[in-house]
Image (cartoon, coloured by chain):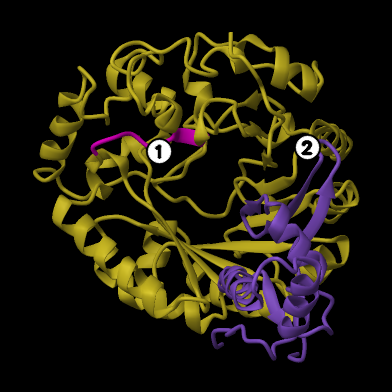
Amino acid sequence: MERLTVSDASALRIAPHIVFRFDETRQKWIMMAPERLMLPDEQAVEILQLIDGKTSVGGIIDSLAKKYSQAPREEIAKDVTAMLQDLADKGCLADANAG
Amino acid sequence: MPTQVDPPLALLAELTHRCPLRCPYCSNPVELERSASELSREEWQRVFTEAAALGVLQVHLSGGEPMVRRDLPALIATANGKGIYTNLITSGTLGGEAELREFAAAGLKHVQLSFQDFTAKTNDRIAGLAGAHEKKMKFAAAVRAVGLPLTVNMVVHRQNLAGLPQMIDMAQALGARRLEIAHVQYYAWALINRAAFLPSREQLDEATRIVEAARERLKGVLAIDYIVPDYHAVRPKSCMNGWARQFLNVTPSGKAVPCHAAETIKDLDFPSVREQSLADIWYRSEAFNKFRGTDWMPEPCQSCDRREIDWGGCRCQALMLAGDAARTDPVCALSPDHVLVEQALNETSRLPAEFVYRHFS
């Protein structure tokens, strides 16, 4: 198995057996992985909600850049890529075009 | 009283104390519960339903060996149906692909498989079961064949630490995404056998160096969780992230406890899920409130700037080593009882590495 490297061209999906859902008790979005629980912040939740197994990372960055037009695209790209790479390294994301 | 009590994040369900293995560092209590006292399927299903309503997000199905329970698929289905993330913690010595397919169909999300060593010889000697290693290797392949994510749990100590690099290779070869390298924690059976397993400072430092290098090399491929033996620490572990802050454990017979060793604290009356709701137990029972927050703390914890990081360390360890669950964990270098830990470390280096297997008394 090889490390998944996140780039503009990557299309990602939430990895199998990772649960990303809204928790009614805490009124927060949660991400559950094997023996791990994450509470993504508002910004991360927005990015995760754009992951649909089709849109490329570049496409996700484009739509965020359009919405937050006061921030330069390259800055958004840097933040989004770093966040997604971190989640990929934790095994929470998978390549949408693989297996 | 603590200011605010949050809902629990996770429940450790000790479905049974029965197990084909006899590991001499087993974390089950020395007084093992017998099968006749175990909660029924309906009782566990009620516990999981109440747990979900209380806000529990993850259930760890453990034991003993949870696969001795024939009703495991039904229990997984109930928890999963309530939105709980289910994790099976197993020795992998009972059953295989057919059972795992049933578990996956019921909604199981993850399997944690324990090993006692990377060699069959040491693995089977520590487990006290011939052929255990071979069964575990087959079980790991079956987990991957079914498509479930696999964590390998490798228990390490002074008798097997030299093979740490090979253990990491083995986890990778088995297709695990996660490896838990867990140094023995000295409670219950492990406390009885402490002298046989406690590593030296040099062994621990070497192990830590190997883990750090492997983490860097295997980033994004194999995540490594590393649990150190706290006897060598300067500050105590944040045991359970604080007493009754995030976790609860239900024993085979239905006792609810904040951690799996808490029953050693004999002057606490732990409530039973047969008699009280999980919500009553979590929010209102005396046992769960006893060491919550920081008000109960003695000095030097009370004025320590780490009191909400370490939460005073481990209550059970304070009892075992210093004779009082309400004292500072003696592992802390600031504890007035810290000399007891130093004595244990000195003593270990002189004692032979003999141990007794866990057994029903």
Look at label 2 and name its amino acid.
Arg
Local crowd size for mark 1, using a 10 Å CA cut-off: few (<14), some (14–19), many (≥20): many
Circle 2 — which element? loop
Left/right of residue B160 with respect to residue B168 in the rendered view: left
Q: Chain of mark 1?
A: B
Q: Nearer the viewer, residue B306 or B83?
A: B306
Q: Chain of mark 2?
A: A
Q: Position of residue B290 (x, y in %)?
A: 55, 12
Q: Is residue B281 magenta?
A: no
Rendered image quadrant of residue A46 = bottom right
Residue B236 vertical placement versus B202 (above, below): above
* SS type, badge 1: helix
In the rendered picture, chain B carries what hue?
yellow
Identify the main secondary structure in magenta: loop
Q: Residue furthest front?
A: A70
Residue B167 shows in this picture: no
A24 shown above or below B98: above
Q: Amino acid at mark 1?
A: Trp
- In which quadrant of the rendered image does the N terminus of chain B lie? top right
Residue interval drawn in magenta:
B234-240
Q: Are marks 2 and 1 on the same chain?
A: no
Answer left or right for B155 relative to B32: left
Q: Quadrant of residue B307?
A: top left
Reading the image, the residue beneath label 2 is: A26
Q: In this figure, which residue is indicated by the disc labeled 1?
A: B189
Q: Residue at x 42, y 62 (%)?
A: B116
**Horizontal arrangement in the rendering, residue B188 relative to residue A11 (left or right):** left
- Give the side of residue B346 with respect to residue B19, left or right: left
Q: Is the Cβ of the residue at disc 2 closer than 8 Å to that at disc 1?
A: no
Q: Quadrant of the rendered structure where residue B89 is?
A: bottom right
Q: Is residue B236 magenta?
A: yes
As drawn, the chain in purple is A
